[in-house]
Amino acid sequence: QVQLVQSGAEVKKPGASVKVSCKASGYTFTSYGISWVRQAPGQGLEWMGWISAYNGNTNYAQKLQGRVTMTTDTSTSTAYMELRSLRSDDTAVYYCARRLDGMDVWGQGTTVTVSS
Amino acid sequence: QSALTQPPSVSGSPGQSVTISCTGTSSDVGSYNRVSWYQQPPGTAPKLMIYEVSNRPSGVPDRFSGSKSGNTASLTISGLQAEDEADYYCSLYTSSSTLVFGGGTKLTVL
């Protein structure tokens, strides 16, 4: 079946970087883009950006420009999201999802905790 | 990009209908039919319920319907069931190929 499986929980110190993976299966990876969405504890959903799995084109939320990088590895059908210069307010559950407009398949979420 | 405005909470009894609104501006919701709705029960990932204002993905019950009037999109759930209790989010795909979410609405089934 179509699914996205994300990497496990991470604990990072302020100023560090984190890289979350999202492995796709059950469909042609390059036919769809991957969005990244995060949710801080008790808060709503925040769109972080999108990457085309076909050609690697990206579009990032203005708020995260300069700190986030999204990449894909088509040989393993895996998308990656790297966030740098972590702060305490980056503590959140990070989700990958297929597509940008009408995200129809979601990963299970990866908890990233930023704490000294 | 301005945020989309949703009511913080709505409630209804089993069997009733509830409507959740998502208000933008004439430049976003009012101009584009790229509104989606997501359901998120506690502790789980969001699930797509409606896309392009009123289209239901395969497997979503027809009790869920979407519409738009002017600058406001709406999600209506008819024949409310206990399992519908969740947070609901609208989103808009913008003309600059970005996405913006509403603040979310907590649905309580009484």
Image (cartoon, rainbow, N blue to C red):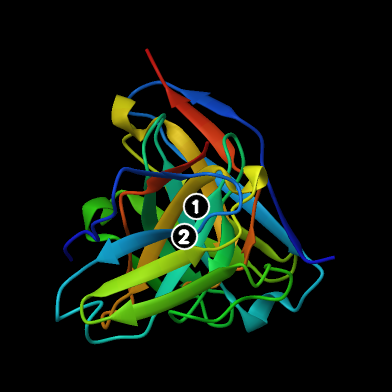
Work out whether A81 lies above or below A115.
below
Please indicate whether residue B51 sits to the left or right of residue A7 in the image: left
For badge 1, the amino acid type reads Met
Q: State the residue lying farthest toward the top.
A: A116
Which label is found at residue B75?
Answer: none
Q: In the image, residue B40 lies at what x, y percent?
A: 55, 47
Q: Chain of mark 1?
A: A
Q: Left or right: A59 with respect to B39?
A: left
Q: Is residue B33 above or below residue A17?
A: below
Quadrant containing the C terminus of chain A in the rendered view = top left
Q: Is residue A102 visible?
A: no
Check contact, mark 1 vs mark 2: CB within 8 A: yes
Q: Residue beneath label 1, please?
A: A81
Q: Residue at x 56, y 43 (%)?
A: B85
Task: Output the chain of dot 2.
Answer: A
Between A72 and B78, which is closer to the camera in this rendering? B78
Residue A96 % position (x, y): 56, 55
Q: Which mark is residue A70?
A: 2
Q: Which residue is found at the position 62% from the left and 41% from the top?
A: B44
Kindly report the distance in space between the C-alpha atoms of the residues bearing marks 1 and 2. Answer: 5 Å
